[in-house]
Image (spheres, helix red, strand yellow):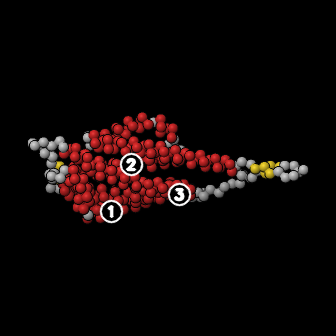
């Protein structure tokens, strides 16, 4: 009978790093960052010019929640230049809203050269999810939170006290809520990305749930108007997104554990015996 000798696969061969040789000095990184910022700024300026041409159409669209909630009310402006600057703000708002995917893609193009191929593939779903969550937050404001808040404010009118809303004040409120909700709805994306780089864990999020609730309530009280509808309208979705983030982070940790188990099994020596 021949002696059984364990056949151990040689894992000591050096693995070629796909990022080897791609290191760049700090100056080149700064030049690349400047280029991406210029592209983003140019895109926002071009979009702002286009949106200014259609500022009245955007204004009419933003006015729909107000007219549905307060059909008999009228908007006024109290300074000769107020309407002009309102249209400028509307154009800037439209540029930020439409240019968000452009800015996000420029950020990705800046960080992509420093990522491995599998990391770039893992980053793409978050790039797609970011505008989707942003639009979801904006839609919640447009169709639910803003009309309810306006109805609440209008219900406080009396026969002697009427609500005369300035056009700049209403549009400022509407645009602030839309952008704030769109940004807050990025919470699952941010926490999941932090979990990908092992900075956030499920246990950490679970233990910090009570502190997260307090932080969400404080943030909603600061960012929204001083009415309960707007504050609850932001706080409740943010807490639900926090719970969604816990589920997403758990999935990330399970995939990481499965990948680690698969890697460990590949390193296990196999014994072959012959007689």
Dot 1 lies on which element?
helix
Q: Position of residue 172 (x, y in %)?
A: 25, 50
Residue 47: numbered disc? 1
> Which residue in the structure is indicated by mark 2?
185
Q: Residue drawn 35% across and 51% down?
A: 137
Q: Residue drawn 24% across and 62% down?
A: 57
Q: Quadrant of residue 100?
A: bottom left
Q: How far apart, in angstroms, are the residues tagged by discs 3 and 1?
A: 29 Å
Q: Position of residue 167 (x, y in %)?
A: 19, 53
Dot 3 lies on which element?
helix
Residue 121: numbered disc? 3
Q: Position of residue 174 (x, y in %)?
A: 27, 51
Instruction: Say if residue 122 shows up in the picture.
Output: yes
Q: Residue drawn 28% across and 42% down?
A: 229
Question: How crowded is the residue under tag 1: few (<14 C-alpha within 10 Å), some, or many (20+)?
Answer: many
Question: How crowded is the residue under tag 2: few (<14 C-alpha within 10 Å), some, or many (20+)?
Answer: many
Q: Quadrant of residue 44?
A: bottom left
Q: Position of residue 125 (x, y in %)?
A: 48, 56
Spot the residue most to the left.
160
How many dots with numbers?
A: 3
Q: How far apart, in angstroms, are the residues tagged by discs 3 and 2?
A: 23 Å
Q: In the image shown, does 180 or 38 lie closer to the viewer?
A: 180
Tell me which numbered mark, 2 or 1, is placed earlier along the sequence: 1
Spot the residue most to the right.
1
Q: In the image shown, does 112 or 26 lie closer to the viewer?
A: 112
Dot 2 lies on which element?
loop
Q: Residue drawn 62% across and 56% down?
A: 17
């Amino acid at each position: 009978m021949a002696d059984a000798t364990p056949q151990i696969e040689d894992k000591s061969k050096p693995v070629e790093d796909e990022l080897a040789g791609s290191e760049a000095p700090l100056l080149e990184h700064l030049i690349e960052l400047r280029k991406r910022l210029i592209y983003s700024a140019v895109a926002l300026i071009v979009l702002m010019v286009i949106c200014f041409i259609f500022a009245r159409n955007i204004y009419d669209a933003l006015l729909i929640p107000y007219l549905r909630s307060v059909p008999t009310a009228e908007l006024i402006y109290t300074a000769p230049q107020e309407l002009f600057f309102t249209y400028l703000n509307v154009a800037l708002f439209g540029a930020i809203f439409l240019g968000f995917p452009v800015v996000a893609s420029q950020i990705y193009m800046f960080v992509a050269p420093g990522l491995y191929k599998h990391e770039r593939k893992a980053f793409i779903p978050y790039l797609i999810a970011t505008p989707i969550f942003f639009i979801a937050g904006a839609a919640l404001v447009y169709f639910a939170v803003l009309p309810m808040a306006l109805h609440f404010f209008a219900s406080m009118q009396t026969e002697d006290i009427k609500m005369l809303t300035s056009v700049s004040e209403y549009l400022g409120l509407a645009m602030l809520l839309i952008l704030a909700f769109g940004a807050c709805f990025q919470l699952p994306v941010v926490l999941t990305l932090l979990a990908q780089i092992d900075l956030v864990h499920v246990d950490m999020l679970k233990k910090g749930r009570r502190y997260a609730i307090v932080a969400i309530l404080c943030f909603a009280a600061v960012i929204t108007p001083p009415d309960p509808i707007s504050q609850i309208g932001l706080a409740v979705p943010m807490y639900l997104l926090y719970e969604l983030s816990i589920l997403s982070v758990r999935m990330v940790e399970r995939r990481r554990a499965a990948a680690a188990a698969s890697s460990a099994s590949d390193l296990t020596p196999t014994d072959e015996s012959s007689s």
